[in-house]
Amino acid sequence: MLKGRSLLEPLDFSVEEMETLFSAADRIIDAPDGYADVCRGKILATLFYEPSTRTRFSFEAAMLRLGGQVIGFSEPGSSSVAKGESIADTMRTVACYADLAVIRHPKEGAPRVAALSTGMPVINAGDGGHQHPTQTLTDLLTIRRERGRFENLTIGLCGDLKFGRTVHSLIKALSRYGGIRFVLISPEELMIPDYVRKEVLQKGAAAFDEVRKLQDVMPELDALYMTRVQKERFFNEEDYIRLKDSYILDAEKMRLARPDMMVLHPLPRVNEIAVEVDADPRAVYFKQAKNGMYVRMALIMALLGLERTAEGL
Ligand code: NCD
Protein backbone atom coordinates (compact mmCIF):
# COMPACT_ATOMS: atom_id res chain seq x y z
CA MET A 1 0.00 0.00 0.00
CA LEU A 2 1.32 3.39 -0.98
CA LYS A 3 -1.33 5.35 0.94
CA GLY A 4 0.18 8.03 3.19
CA ARG A 5 3.77 7.32 2.02
CA SER A 6 6.26 9.82 0.64
CA LEU A 7 8.38 9.43 -2.49
CA LEU A 8 11.83 10.88 -1.82
CA GLU A 9 14.18 8.41 -3.50
CA PRO A 10 13.72 6.15 -6.52
CA LEU A 11 14.03 3.02 -4.36
CA ASP A 12 11.41 4.07 -1.79
CA PHE A 13 8.89 1.89 -3.61
CA SER A 14 9.42 -1.78 -4.36
CA VAL A 15 9.46 -3.16 -7.89
CA GLU A 16 5.93 -4.49 -7.28
CA GLU A 17 4.70 -1.12 -5.99
CA MET A 18 6.17 0.60 -9.05
CA GLU A 19 4.39 -1.96 -11.19
CA THR A 20 1.03 -1.04 -9.64
CA LEU A 21 1.70 2.59 -10.58
CA PHE A 22 2.60 1.70 -14.17
CA SER A 23 -0.49 -0.44 -14.64
CA ALA A 24 -2.63 2.31 -13.08
CA ALA A 25 -1.04 4.80 -15.51
CA ASP A 26 -1.83 2.45 -18.42
CA ARG A 27 -5.46 2.28 -17.32
CA ILE A 28 -5.64 6.07 -17.06
CA ILE A 29 -4.13 6.48 -20.54
CA ASP A 30 -6.77 4.09 -21.91
CA ALA A 31 -9.72 5.94 -20.36
CA PRO A 32 -8.66 9.28 -18.81
CA ASP A 33 -12.21 10.62 -18.48
CA GLY A 34 -13.06 7.94 -15.95
CA TYR A 35 -10.75 9.63 -13.44
CA ALA A 36 -12.14 13.17 -13.62
CA ASP A 37 -13.62 13.10 -10.10
CA VAL A 38 -11.31 10.78 -8.20
CA CYS A 39 -9.59 13.58 -6.24
CA ARG A 40 -12.56 15.90 -5.77
CA GLY A 41 -12.11 17.83 -2.52
CA LYS A 42 -8.37 17.11 -2.30
CA ILE A 43 -5.62 19.72 -2.51
CA LEU A 44 -2.07 19.32 -3.82
CA ALA A 45 0.57 21.87 -2.76
CA THR A 46 3.46 22.54 -5.15
CA LEU A 47 6.52 24.17 -3.59
CA PHE A 48 9.05 24.97 -6.28
CA TYR A 49 12.23 26.61 -5.01
CA GLU A 50 13.86 26.02 -8.43
CA PRO A 51 12.67 26.55 -12.03
CA SER A 52 10.47 23.92 -13.65
CA THR A 53 8.13 23.55 -16.59
CA ARG A 54 7.24 19.89 -17.08
CA THR A 55 7.44 18.68 -13.51
CA ARG A 56 5.28 21.45 -12.04
CA PHE A 57 2.82 21.65 -14.92
CA SER A 58 2.46 17.88 -15.14
CA PHE A 59 1.79 17.61 -11.39
CA GLU A 60 -0.72 20.46 -11.56
CA ALA A 61 -2.38 19.08 -14.69
CA ALA A 62 -2.45 15.63 -13.08
CA MET A 63 -4.27 16.92 -9.99
CA LEU A 64 -6.67 19.05 -12.04
CA ARG A 65 -7.48 16.12 -14.33
CA LEU A 66 -8.28 14.07 -11.23
CA GLY A 67 -10.77 16.73 -10.15
CA GLY A 68 -8.57 18.05 -7.31
CA GLN A 69 -7.22 21.53 -6.68
CA VAL A 70 -3.69 22.95 -6.54
CA ILE A 71 -2.04 25.63 -4.40
CA GLY A 72 1.63 26.59 -4.37
CA PHE A 73 4.45 28.81 -5.49
CA SER A 74 7.01 28.68 -8.24
CA GLU A 75 8.82 31.82 -7.11
CA PRO A 76 9.96 31.28 -3.53
CA GLY A 77 10.55 35.04 -3.41
CA SER A 78 6.78 35.54 -3.42
CA SER A 79 6.25 33.37 -0.31
CA SER A 80 7.42 33.67 3.30
CA VAL A 81 10.61 31.90 2.23
CA ALA A 82 11.73 35.44 1.34
CA LYS A 83 11.25 36.38 5.01
CA GLY A 84 13.58 33.59 6.11
CA GLU A 85 11.06 30.88 7.01
CA SER A 86 12.55 27.38 7.36
CA ILE A 87 11.42 24.49 5.15
CA ALA A 88 10.12 22.74 8.27
CA ASP A 89 7.87 25.65 9.24
CA THR A 90 6.68 26.18 5.66
CA MET A 91 5.77 22.50 5.44
CA ARG A 92 3.94 22.45 8.77
CA THR A 93 1.88 25.36 7.52
CA VAL A 94 1.21 23.88 4.10
CA ALA A 95 0.05 20.66 5.81
CA CYS A 96 -2.76 22.70 7.45
CA TYR A 97 -4.18 23.41 3.99
CA ALA A 98 -3.21 20.58 1.64
CA ASP A 99 -3.44 16.78 1.47
CA LEU A 100 -0.05 16.18 -0.13
CA ALA A 101 2.90 18.25 -1.32
CA VAL A 102 5.42 18.25 -4.12
CA ILE A 103 8.73 19.99 -3.46
CA ARG A 104 11.67 20.91 -5.68
CA HIS A 105 14.69 22.44 -3.98
CA PRO A 106 18.30 23.27 -4.92
CA LYS A 107 19.59 21.64 -1.71
CA GLU A 108 20.11 17.88 -1.67
CA GLY A 109 17.98 16.29 1.03
CA ALA A 110 15.58 19.23 1.41
CA PRO A 111 12.52 17.09 0.48
CA ARG A 112 13.48 14.64 3.25
CA VAL A 113 13.57 17.49 5.77
CA ALA A 114 10.18 18.56 4.41
CA ALA A 115 8.75 15.05 4.80
CA LEU A 116 10.04 14.75 8.37
CA SER A 117 8.26 17.99 9.28
CA THR A 118 4.78 16.78 8.41
CA GLY A 119 2.59 13.70 8.41
CA MET A 120 1.33 14.21 4.88
CA PRO A 121 2.85 12.57 1.82
CA VAL A 122 5.73 14.54 0.30
CA ILE A 123 7.03 13.99 -3.22
CA ASN A 124 10.59 14.93 -4.19
CA ALA A 125 10.37 16.75 -7.51
CA GLY A 126 14.16 17.17 -7.72
CA ASP A 127 16.70 18.03 -5.01
CA GLY A 128 19.83 19.70 -6.34
CA GLY A 129 22.07 17.35 -8.29
CA HIS A 130 20.80 14.40 -6.26
CA GLN A 131 17.57 12.59 -7.20
CA HIS A 132 14.37 13.06 -9.18
CA PRO A 133 12.20 9.99 -8.56
CA THR A 134 9.06 11.09 -10.41
CA GLN A 135 11.09 11.73 -13.56
CA THR A 136 12.20 8.12 -13.14
CA LEU A 137 8.57 6.98 -13.00
CA THR A 138 8.07 8.92 -16.24
CA ASP A 139 11.15 7.39 -17.86
CA LEU A 140 10.27 3.85 -16.78
CA LEU A 141 6.66 4.14 -17.90
CA THR A 142 7.92 5.29 -21.30
CA ILE A 143 10.39 2.41 -21.64
CA ARG A 144 7.71 -0.05 -20.52
CA ARG A 145 5.14 1.26 -22.99
CA GLU A 146 7.61 1.44 -25.88
CA ARG A 147 9.47 -1.80 -25.23
CA GLY A 148 7.16 -3.84 -22.99
CA ARG A 149 9.89 -4.73 -20.49
CA PHE A 150 12.85 -3.46 -18.45
CA GLU A 151 14.93 -6.64 -18.43
CA ASN A 152 17.82 -7.32 -20.80
CA LEU A 153 18.18 -3.82 -22.17
CA THR A 154 21.31 -1.86 -23.02
CA ILE A 155 20.70 1.72 -21.96
CA GLY A 156 23.02 4.56 -22.98
CA LEU A 157 23.04 7.62 -20.73
CA CYS A 158 24.77 10.59 -22.31
CA GLY A 159 25.79 14.08 -21.23
CA ASP A 160 26.00 15.46 -17.71
CA LEU A 161 26.05 12.32 -15.62
CA LYS A 162 27.65 14.12 -12.69
CA PHE A 163 25.01 16.73 -11.93
CA GLY A 164 22.06 15.16 -13.76
CA ARG A 165 19.73 14.01 -11.00
CA THR A 166 17.41 12.25 -13.46
CA VAL A 167 20.34 10.02 -14.47
CA HIS A 168 21.17 9.13 -10.86
CA SER A 169 17.57 8.14 -10.14
CA LEU A 170 17.12 6.22 -13.37
CA ILE A 171 20.30 4.17 -12.85
CA LYS A 172 19.23 3.26 -9.32
CA ALA A 173 15.76 2.24 -10.40
CA LEU A 174 16.80 0.26 -13.49
CA SER A 175 19.57 -1.61 -11.69
CA ARG A 176 16.88 -3.60 -9.86
CA TYR A 177 15.89 -5.36 -13.10
CA GLY A 178 17.77 -8.31 -14.58
CA GLY A 179 20.14 -8.19 -17.51
CA ILE A 180 20.54 -4.43 -17.64
CA ARG A 181 23.70 -2.96 -19.13
CA PHE A 182 24.43 0.74 -18.81
CA VAL A 183 26.68 2.56 -21.24
CA LEU A 184 27.66 5.80 -19.54
CA ILE A 185 28.77 8.39 -22.08
CA SER A 186 30.23 11.61 -20.71
CA PRO A 187 33.28 13.85 -20.68
CA GLU A 188 35.79 12.99 -17.93
CA GLU A 189 34.62 15.97 -15.84
CA LEU A 190 30.97 14.92 -15.95
CA MET A 191 31.22 11.23 -15.09
CA ILE A 192 28.65 9.77 -12.67
CA PRO A 193 29.34 10.39 -8.97
CA ASP A 194 31.09 7.68 -7.00
CA TYR A 195 28.08 6.95 -4.82
CA VAL A 196 26.01 6.00 -7.87
CA ARG A 197 28.86 3.94 -9.35
CA LYS A 198 29.25 2.09 -6.06
CA GLU A 199 25.56 1.38 -5.68
CA VAL A 200 25.37 0.02 -9.20
CA LEU A 201 28.53 -2.03 -8.66
CA GLN A 202 27.63 -3.24 -5.18
CA LYS A 203 24.24 -4.41 -6.35
CA GLY A 204 26.14 -6.40 -8.91
CA ALA A 205 22.99 -6.71 -10.99
CA ALA A 206 23.81 -4.31 -13.79
CA ALA A 207 26.86 -4.32 -16.03
CA PHE A 208 28.25 -0.95 -17.06
CA ASP A 209 30.85 0.70 -19.23
CA GLU A 210 32.05 4.27 -19.10
CA VAL A 211 32.97 5.72 -22.48
CA ARG A 212 33.67 9.09 -24.11
CA LYS A 213 32.44 8.73 -27.66
CA LEU A 214 28.76 8.45 -28.48
CA GLN A 215 29.19 7.29 -32.10
CA ASP A 216 31.11 4.16 -31.12
CA VAL A 217 28.35 2.77 -28.92
CA MET A 218 25.24 3.88 -30.84
CA PRO A 219 24.69 0.53 -32.61
CA GLU A 220 24.57 -1.36 -29.28
CA LEU A 221 21.84 0.63 -27.60
CA ASP A 222 18.17 -0.25 -27.00
CA ALA A 223 17.62 3.23 -25.57
CA LEU A 224 19.61 6.45 -25.48
CA TYR A 225 18.88 8.84 -22.60
CA MET A 226 20.24 12.27 -23.52
CA THR A 227 20.70 14.98 -20.90
CA ARG A 228 21.48 18.67 -20.80
CA VAL A 229 24.68 19.95 -19.20
CA GLN A 230 23.38 21.35 -15.88
CA LYS A 231 24.56 24.95 -16.13
CA GLU A 232 23.13 25.97 -12.74
CA ARG A 233 25.29 23.43 -10.86
CA PHE A 234 28.63 24.61 -12.27
CA PHE A 235 30.98 26.65 -10.16
CA ASN A 236 32.38 28.58 -13.09
CA GLU A 237 31.06 29.71 -16.44
CA GLU A 238 34.25 28.73 -18.34
CA ASP A 239 33.85 25.04 -17.52
CA TYR A 240 30.22 25.15 -18.57
CA ILE A 241 31.02 26.79 -21.90
CA ARG A 242 33.76 24.27 -22.57
CA LEU A 243 31.55 21.26 -21.82
CA LYS A 244 28.06 22.33 -22.87
CA ASP A 245 28.23 21.05 -26.43
CA SER A 246 30.17 17.86 -25.71
CA TYR A 247 27.45 15.77 -27.37
CA ILE A 248 24.96 16.70 -30.03
CA LEU A 249 22.65 13.98 -31.29
CA ASP A 250 21.72 14.64 -34.91
CA ALA A 251 20.23 12.77 -37.86
CA GLU A 252 23.67 11.57 -38.95
CA LYS A 253 24.36 9.90 -35.60
CA MET A 254 20.85 8.46 -35.56
CA ARG A 255 21.77 6.55 -38.73
CA LEU A 256 24.20 4.50 -36.62
CA ALA A 257 21.45 3.41 -34.23
CA ARG A 258 19.19 0.39 -34.35
CA PRO A 259 15.88 0.87 -36.13
CA ASP A 260 14.08 0.51 -32.79
CA MET A 261 16.43 2.44 -30.47
CA MET A 262 14.34 4.91 -28.47
CA VAL A 263 15.69 8.36 -27.70
CA LEU A 264 14.65 9.68 -24.30
CA HIS A 265 15.35 13.06 -22.71
CA PRO A 266 13.88 14.43 -19.47
CA LEU A 267 13.81 17.89 -21.11
CA PRO A 268 14.46 20.81 -21.22
CA ARG A 269 16.79 20.34 -24.16
CA VAL A 270 19.40 22.93 -25.00
CA ASN A 271 21.72 21.88 -27.87
CA GLU A 272 22.21 18.21 -27.15
CA ILE A 273 19.52 16.97 -29.56
CA ALA A 274 19.26 18.68 -32.93
CA VAL A 275 15.68 19.67 -33.76
CA GLU A 276 15.85 17.50 -36.90
CA VAL A 277 15.80 14.40 -34.68
CA ASP A 278 12.28 15.29 -33.43
CA ALA A 279 10.75 13.95 -36.64
CA ASP A 280 12.45 10.56 -36.19
CA PRO A 281 9.86 8.06 -34.88
CA ARG A 282 12.51 6.80 -32.44
CA ALA A 283 12.47 10.17 -30.64
CA VAL A 284 9.99 9.69 -27.79
CA TYR A 285 10.84 12.62 -25.50
CA PHE A 286 7.61 14.52 -26.00
CA LYS A 287 5.60 11.33 -25.51
CA GLN A 288 7.70 10.86 -22.37
CA ALA A 289 6.65 14.32 -21.11
CA LYS A 290 3.00 13.33 -21.59
CA ASN A 291 3.50 10.00 -19.84
CA GLY A 292 4.83 12.07 -16.92
CA MET A 293 1.40 13.53 -16.32
CA TYR A 294 -0.32 10.13 -16.40
CA VAL A 295 2.10 8.45 -14.04
CA ARG A 296 1.80 11.42 -11.66
CA MET A 297 -1.99 10.97 -11.74
CA ALA A 298 -1.44 7.35 -10.71
CA LEU A 299 1.02 8.45 -7.99
CA ILE A 300 -1.28 11.09 -6.50
CA MET A 301 -4.17 8.62 -6.37
CA ALA A 302 -1.99 5.96 -4.75
CA LEU A 303 -0.54 8.28 -2.06
CA LEU A 304 -4.03 9.53 -1.23
CA GLY A 305 -5.30 5.94 -1.05
CA LEU A 306 -7.74 6.51 -3.89
CA GLU A 307 -6.59 3.83 -6.31
CA ARG A 308 -9.46 1.50 -5.41
CA THR A 309 -12.03 4.12 -6.34
CA ALA A 310 -10.43 4.48 -9.75
CA GLU A 311 -10.09 0.76 -10.27
CA GLY A 312 -13.77 0.34 -9.51
CA LEU A 313 -14.73 2.78 -12.25
C1 NCD B 1 15.11 17.67 -15.29
C2 NCD B 1 15.43 18.19 -13.90
O1 NCD B 1 14.81 19.15 -13.44
O2 NCD B 1 16.30 17.58 -13.30
N1 NCD B 1 13.97 18.27 -15.83
C3 NCD B 1 12.75 17.69 -15.58
O3 NCD B 1 12.31 17.62 -14.46
N2 NCD B 1 12.10 17.15 -16.62
C4 NCD B 1 16.26 17.70 -16.22
C5 NCD B 1 16.99 18.99 -16.40
O4 NCD B 1 16.66 20.02 -15.83
O5 NCD B 1 17.94 18.96 -17.19
Image (cartoon, rainbow, N blue to C red):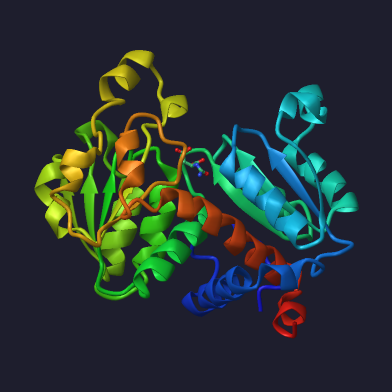
Can residue 232 be seen in this snapshot? yes
The location of residue 177, given as percent across then percent down, is 34, 73
Direction front: furthest residue: 279
Please report the residue visible at 42 percent of the width from the left and 26 percent of the height from the top.
231
Please report the residue visible at 55 percent of the width from the left and 77 percent of the height from the top.
23
Is residue 193 rendered to the left or right of residue 73?
left
Image height of 213 relative to 28, above or below: above
Can residue 9 be seen in this snapshot? no
Please report the residue visible at 78 percent of the width from the left and 41 percent of the height from the top.
72
Is residue 52 rendered to the left or right of residue 306?
left
The location of residue 268, given as percent across then percent down, is 47, 37
Image height of 264 relative to 270, above or below: below
Image height of 50 relative to 195, above or below: above
In the image, 33 versus 82, the foreground residue is: 33
In the image, 48 versus 113, the foreground residue is: 48
Looking at the rendering, in which quadrant would you find the N terminus? Answer: bottom right
Residue 57 quadrant: top right
Residue 241 quadrant: top left
The location of residue 155, given as percent across then percent down, is 26, 59
